Amino acid sequence: MKINNQYGIPNDTVITIAGTVGVGKSTMTNALADALGFRTSFEKVDGNPYLDNFYKDFERWSFHLQVYFLAERFKEQKRIFEYGGGFVQDRSIYEDTGIFAKMHQEKGTMSEIDYQTYKNLFDAMVMTPYFPHPDLLIYLEGSFDDVLERLRSRGRKMEQDTPIEYWREMYNRYEEWINNFNTCPVMRININDYDLFENGDSIEPILERVGKFVQASRNYIKA
Ligand SMILES: Nc1ncnc2c1ncn2[C@@H]1O[C@H](COP(=O)(O)OP(=O)(O)O)[C@@H](O)[C@H]1O
Ligand SMILES: Nc1ncnc2c1ncn2[C@H]1C[C@H](O)[C@@H](COP(=O)(O)O)O1
């Protein structure tokens, strides 16, 4: 096991960043990958052939979008595996089903049949012993108002045009989801506890915590 950093984080570690839309996952992904010399895996928003249409008509496009995201994330998973790890990933695959697909099914914007088809596919591809889970899921959390402010400041039109209730519903679901998530180790970070723009050094304590988490979970697996 090779380690090229002072935090004791092995070079083959896979870290995934989870959290609601706009909370700061992409920014954190870049900061951690830069600090560790890791590769990044981003979800593509530009060039996503369904996303714009989805926001205009959930019922029509939710199944298509979920299948698209699943295929994209699975391809990324394969790439991560082929490189032998050393990645920071923007959004976990678990949020697709645990948050998005479930929410649309329960709100009636994805039919029960479509949801079951999607869920069967997801379980067959992901929830199997052959699918490598990340070493650590970093969950970013903050107040709803702070997240909304970030969403506004980012200014993606399709998200701005979506009613605030959508983001509130998602925010509440995220809190419940993370409290019950146990597929891989979780480290929670409050977005008020660091500032990657004004104080680049605030990544340091995060890296130290990541090192401790990864070592503890690898020792646990070995024992
Ligand atoms: N630590 C931070 N402090 C202040 N603003 C941030 C921070 N991280 C992200 N942002 C801003 O919040 C918005 C959403 O961040 P982003 O990383 O794109 O979120 P996500 O990937 O979770 O959707 C962007 O405008 C980004 O510049
Ligand atoms: N699985 C998904 N279903 C619906 N919408 C999704 C899914 N994954 C991501 N999205 C949307 C939400 C945002 O508008 C963009 C990008 O997400 P972000 O949290 O900003 O990285 O895609």
Image: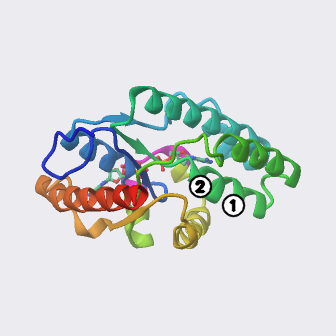
The residue located at (31%, 50%) in the rendering is: 28
Q: In this view, does 90 lie above or below 170?
A: above
Mark 2 Cα shell of 10 Å, populated few (<14), some (14-19), many (≥20): few
User: Which tag, 2 or 1, sits closer to the chain's start?
Assistant: 1
The type of colouring in the image is: rainbow
Residue 69 image-quadrant placement: top right
Main SS, magenta residues: helix
Q: Residue 162 carries which label?
A: 2
Let me know if residue 154 is in the magenta part.
Answer: yes
- Which residue is painted at 45% across and 71% down in the image? 144
Residue furthest front as drawn:
223
Which amino acid type corresponds to the residue marked 1 in the rendered image?
Met
Of 27 and 3, which appears nearest the observer? 3
The one nearer the camera, 191 or 2, is 2
The residue carrying mark 1 is: 103
Residue 107 falls within the magenta-colored stretch? no
Magenta region: 151-158
Query: Would you say the beta carbon of the disc 2 residue lies within 8 angstroms of ligand 2?
Result: no
Dot 1 crowding, Cα within 10 Å, few <14, some 14–19, many 20+? some
Helix, strand or loop at label 1? It is helix
The image position of residue 177, as x and y in percent, is 57, 67
Task: Please give left or right for residue 22 compared with residue 66 in the image.
Answer: left
